[in-house]
């Protein structure tokens, strides 16, 4: 799959297969998309109808920070009203190319954690997807 999370709007700095280590207190901006040409991403079960969702994953629920410590929004201003742990809808189709990159604003409230600790159990995912040629 060519779609993933990137550190830049140009989709040239991939964050890798895992976006773990979401533990730094404060706000950050990453992007979701594909640098490949001629691709699209849709829901695998109901393509073109069901919205894709960026979800907060917690591989070790009950330990470390809870998924509720992570807020997601399409804009920085949206973070204030976002609910921690709630998925971010990014539309029913995401087209490839840097011009179609989806900004993902993240607010991490690590105040309930331990200073200096990296919580490797938290990450982001876009489940149940199918990538196809356009």
Image (spheres, helix red, strand yellow):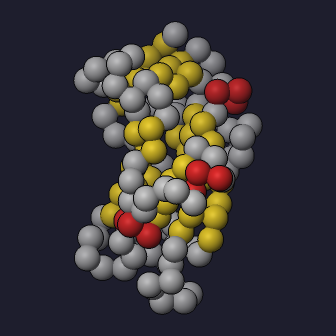
Residue nearer the viewer, 39 or 57: 57
- Measured as percent of width and height from the top left, residue 88 is found at 45, 44
Q: Can you give x and y, in whole percent of width and height, for residue 23 in the image? A: 52, 73
What residue appears at the point 59 percent right and 24 percent down from the top-left corner? 96
* Residue occupying the point 33% across, 63% down: 58
Q: In the current view of this chain or complex, which residue is farthest to the front?
A: 81
Horizontal and vertical percent for residue 16?
54, 50
Tell me if residue 27 can be seen. Answer: yes
* Above or below: residue 69 compared with residue 87: below
Q: Along the horizontal axis of the image, is 94 left or right of 69?
A: right
Which image quadrant for residue 128? top left
Count up the numbered dots. 0
Instruction: Examine the rendered structure and indicate whether residue 26 appears above or below residue 81.
Output: below
Decide if residue 49 is on the left or right side of residue 29.
left
Q: Residue at x 44, y 70 (%)?
A: 69
Quarter of the image where one finds residue 47: top left
Q: Give the residue at x 43% y 59%.
A: 83
Which of the two residues, 80 or 24, is positioned nearer the viewer here?
80
Q: Is residue 62 above or below residue 37?
A: below
Residue 26, image x, y percentages: 62, 71
- Using the rendered image of the protein, determine whether residue 123 is visible from the camera's viewpoint: no
């Amino acid at each position: 799959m060519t779609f993933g999370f990137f550190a830049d709007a140009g989709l040239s700095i991939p964050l890798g297969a895992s976006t773990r280590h979401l533990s730094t207190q404060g706000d950050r901006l990453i992007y979701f998309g594909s640098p490949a040409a001629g691709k699209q991403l849709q829901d695998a079960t109901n393509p073109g109808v069901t919205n894709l969702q960026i979800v907060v994953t917690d591989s070790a629920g009950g330990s470390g920070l809870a998924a509720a410590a992570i807020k997601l929004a399409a804009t920085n201003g949206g973070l204030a009203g976002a609910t921690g742990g709630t998925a971010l809808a990014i539309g029913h189709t995401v087209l490839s190319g840097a011009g179609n990159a989806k900004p993902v604003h993240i607010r991490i409230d690590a105040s309930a954690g331990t200073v200096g600790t990296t919580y490797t159990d938290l990450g982001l995912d876009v489940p149940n997807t199918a990538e196809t040629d356009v």
